[in-house]
């Protein structure tokens, strides 16, 4: 069974944190699905992955771009995983579904701690993960580093 990692953004925004997490995943040879809460946010994530660094980009695509099963990072608002990714990253309002935990090695919920709704939803998702008996870890930013604060 996989684990759910909660990443609480407090000092660096999603635009800085998501590329870092995706880069580390790709360096380990992992394929990733990034699921956003709505189509507008998905487009913003798509744009950001092309432009976050002038010297590089993160290879990614969507169903509309074609070759979905060949994408190392697949962007979606739905539940599909055409390339058999082992990592699911949930951003911008996407929520943890405990039924998906066995389908992935890791599910990463990345949420903004400065947005009350995001914080409330992350707390509810933590309780759902804990209630389902799934393994969960809570990480918070601290001066540019991730510090583990809790574990289910």
Image (cartoon, grey):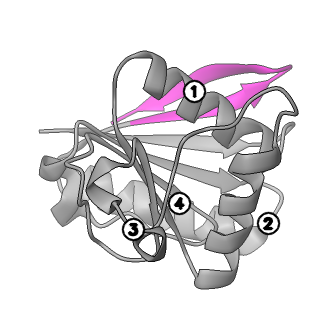
Depicted 118 relative to depicted 4: above or below: below
Query: Which mark identifies residue 66?
Result: 3
Question: Mark 2 and mark 3: span between their CA atoms?
Answer: 34 Å
Q: Which of the marked residues, 1 or 4, is nearer the chain's N terminus?
A: 1
The residue pinned by badge 2 equals 115
On the picture, is 110 further left or further right than 96? right
Quarter of the image for residue 38 reads bottom right
- Tell me which numbered mark, 3 or 4, is placed earlier along the sequence: 3
- Asked if residue 151 lies in the magenta stretch, the reply is yes
Pointer 2 or 1: first along the chain: 1
Q: Which residues are magenta?
A: 137-152
Front residue of 139/109: it is 109
> Counting other residues with Cα less than 10 Å from the Cα at mark 3, is it few (<14), some (14-19), or many (20 or more)?
few
Q: Where on the picture, by quarter, is residue 142? A: top right
Give the distance between the C-alpha atoms of the residues marked 3 and 1, in whole angstroms: 22 Å
Q: Tell whether label 1 touches label 2 (CB within 8 Å).
A: no
Find out whether the residues at labels 3 and 4 contact each other: C-beta distance under 8 Å. no
Query: Mark 2 or 3, which is nearer the eye?
Result: 3
């Amino acid at each position: 069974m996989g684990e759910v990692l909660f990443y609480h953004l407090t000092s660096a925004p999603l635009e800085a944190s998501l590329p870092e997490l995706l880069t580390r995943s790709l360096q380990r040879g992992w394929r990733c699905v990034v699921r956003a809460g709505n189509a507008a946010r998905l487009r913003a994530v798509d744009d950001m992955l092309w432009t976050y660094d002038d010297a590089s980009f993160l290879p990614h695509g969507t169903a509309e771009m074609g070759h979905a099963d060949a994408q190392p990072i697949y962007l979606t608002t739905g539940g599909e995983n055409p390339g058999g990714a082992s990592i699911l990253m949930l951003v911008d309002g996407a929520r943890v579904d405990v039924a998906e935990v066995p389908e992935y090695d890791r599910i990463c919920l990345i949420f903004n701690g400065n947005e009350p709704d995001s914080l409330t939803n992350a707390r509810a998702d933590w309780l759902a993960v804990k209630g389902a008996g799934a393994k969960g870890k809570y990480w918070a930013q601290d001066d540019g580093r991730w510090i583990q604060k809790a574990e289910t």
